[in-house]
Image (cartoon, rainbow, N blue to C red):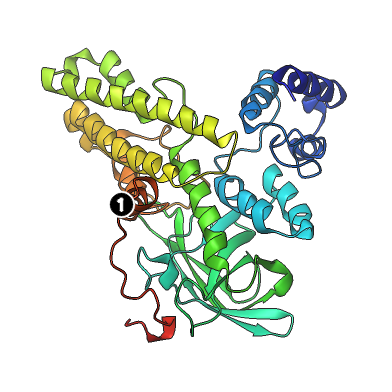
Amino acid sequence: MTAEELRAQVAAFLSAHDPSEMSAVDFLRARFDVGLAWVHFPEGLGGQGAPRALQGEVEAAFAAAGAPDNNPRRILIGLGMAAPTILAFGTEEQKKRYLRPLWTGEEVWCQLFSEPGAGSDLAALATRAVRDGDDWVVTGQKVWTSSAHLAQWAILVTRTDPDVPKHQGMTYFLCDMTAPGVEVRPLRQITGEAEFNEVFLTEVRIPDSQRIGAVGEGWKVAQTTLMNERVAIGGTAMPREGGMIGLVAKTWRDRPELRTPELRDRLVQHWVEAESLRLAGERQRQQLAVGAPGPEGSAMKVAFAELNQQLSGLELELLGEEGLRYEDWTMRRPEQVDFFGRDAGYRYLRAKGNSIEGGTSEVLRNIISERVLGLPSEPRVDKDVAWKDLPR
């Protein structure tokens, strides 16, 4: 498969499916069915088994024609985390059931991983799933759940065997967020908004047909999700001066009266860092074109978080007193995070979460040291202790 062949397919598709005469959903369904959704996925599942690197050619061709997209920022968790996990570990029936409405945006997904009592140690989670015939009964609490107030489905990790070490007793499920016993409560953030939620699960019944992977292999499945999550957060394709650096550079150019030599030095340094990160992300995407994401994505995510926080702070300093103003602290439950349509104060506050969400920077540095650099692991006294015997 070549870029020219794919562009020809897009042209033929558009000649038979005029986006101005179809609803966006019908257009996206048809695009999925002919294998022009994510082209590296298998045939019949929205793709053609083509190289991942060719996805950009397809997106560019549809964008040039003014065709609707699936609003990827709104369904990032589904696209970046649920879909690759279902593809890697799901049954054929699960792939056919979930991937199409996930990609078209008809079903929004969220991630039920973090818990109040587990901190940064996902394997210490306590949400229980107990087998009851063909169902599992799930009880527990999850936290920091983005888009839970919008989601129809969730990827969920539970504790199914407390009598074995913590990494061995976990099982992975797909949870219907509309099922009885699922309660979503907003968590208001420092920005004033509540894009995050806490989710309470009270005797929620999940059919065994919604289990992903084998019983007790939830940690293995979750690792695929987490690796893809870090790439989704820190490895997004950007043009030069894309993202936060572009916003700060624009303020610098438009407002010469705000400039000082010290701020100029910092801006130039961050510009170089942003360009280095952009090029590193491009290299990572090229590697992904021939394989699955690995622990290297953790380094991209750490660098992205630090740079975003430094740039948002620089923008606030550059604006001086203007930067102290905050446009609106109204309680809202947004559909997506928007760094670009808001003021500098919002960006400064929201960037604080970048080093927490998707894996804290401290945990990711451990992953980098152990799995990328090959350094010795930290001592883990709980490695061979049954989960039920761990101090809490």
Q: Whole-percent x and y of residue 295?
A: 44, 47
Please tell me in which quadrant of the rendered image residue 214 appears: bottom right
Q: Is residue 98 left or right of residue 324?
A: right
Does residue 203 appear in the picture of this structure? no
In the depicted view, which residue is nearer to us: 303 or 320? 303
Instruction: Name the element at disc 1.
Output: loop
For the N terminus, the image quarter is top right
Quarter holding the C terminus? bottom left
Q: Quadrant of residue 342?
A: top left
Q: Position of residue 390 (x, y in %)?
A: 36, 82
Please name the amino acid that badge 1 sits on. Answer: Leu
Judge from the rendering whether residue 355 lies leftward or rightward of residue 234; answer left or right. left
Who's the residue at 48% across and 59% down the image?
145
Above or below, comparing residue 14 to residue 125 in the picture: above
Answer above or below: position of 314 versus 334: above
Q: Closer to the camera, 99 or 109?
A: 99
Q: Which residue is mark 1?
A: 375
| Above or below: residue 246 compared with residue 108 | above
In percent of width and height, residue 111 lies at 53, 59
Left or right, residue 383 beside residue 235: left
Q: Residues within 10 Å of mark 1 (few under 14, many from 20)?
A: few
Query: What residue appears at the point 66 percent right and 33 percent down from the top-left corner?
Result: 69
* Residue at the image position 81 percent from the left and 43 percent from the top: 44
Q: State the image coordinates of residue 263 (x, y, percent, origin top left).
A: 16, 23
